[in-house]
Image: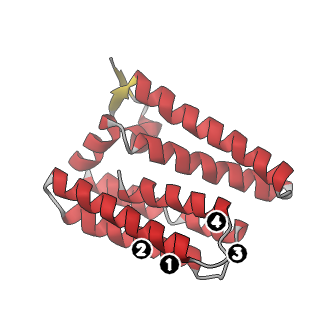
Amino acid sequence: MLVRVPRFLVLLHGESTTLAALVATWSAALLAAAFAAWWARVVVPMDFLHTAAMAVVAADLAAGFVAGLSNGTTSYYHSQPRALWTVLGLNIAPPAFLLWLFPIGGIFWPVLCVYALGGAAVLLRVTHPETRRLLSGFLVLLGSAEIMAGAGIPGEAQFLGFAYLFKILYS
């Protein structure tokens, strides 16, 4: 059953999507935000501002990760490449927040951002769906190797880096 998406959510879901995609996307966002807030307050512990930023970034990455798998989002971006460029431009923000939350080496998050957005720019030029999907998977794996090779990167930051790569490169 297709659901018409409110105008302010079109960049996340496309113009229409299934109820299952909406539930999965928003459930992932809420669960990620709750877990990140718990982790930031209890495990690390971070102050309120860092905790709030961590929850927002986690929700954004989770929602983008799951929405990127839906047909509604995928078909919307393939028919509206300008909208995809807009979303890619907005996705400079998560690495900036992650740099503030995890100031590891200073260059890790900017390099990951340039890699992901550069890869997305290349993928936008690929017209054959299977080739694009295969190249997306390759770029995610190559970027994941970059993340894992980074010395001293905490597991939490690695996980968020993987989610960022998948969100940007596999949608």
Q: Is 137 drawn above or below residue 70 in the view shown? A: below
How far apart are the two marked residues, 3 and 1, measured between alpha carbons?
13 Å
Label for residue 103?
Answer: 3
Q: Position of residue 60 (x, y in %)?
A: 56, 49
3 or 1: tag closer to the N-terminus:
3
**For residue 27, what is the image quadrant?**
top right
User: Which quarter of the figure is the N terminus placed in?
Assistant: top left
For the rendered model, the colour scheme is secondary structure
Q: Pointer 4 and pointer 3: residues touching (CB < 8 Å)?
A: no
Q: Residues within 10 Å of mark 1 (few under 14, many from 20)?
A: few
How many neighbours does mark 3 have within 10 angstroms: few (below 14), some (14-19), or many (20 or more)?
some
Left or right: 74 as drawn, with respect to 8: left
Q: CA distance from mark 4 to mark 3?
A: 8 Å
Decide: marks 2, 1 in contact (CB < 8 A)? yes
Q: For residue 120, which numbered disc appears in the image?
A: none
Using the image, determine if residue 59 lies above or below residue 94: above
State yes or no: discs 1 and 4 in contact (Cβ < 8 Å): no
Disc 2/disc 1 C-alpha distance (Å): 6 Å
SS at mark 1?
helix
Q: Which residue is mark 2?
A: 115
Q: CA distance from mark 1 to mark 4?
A: 12 Å
What residue would you read off at disc 1? 111
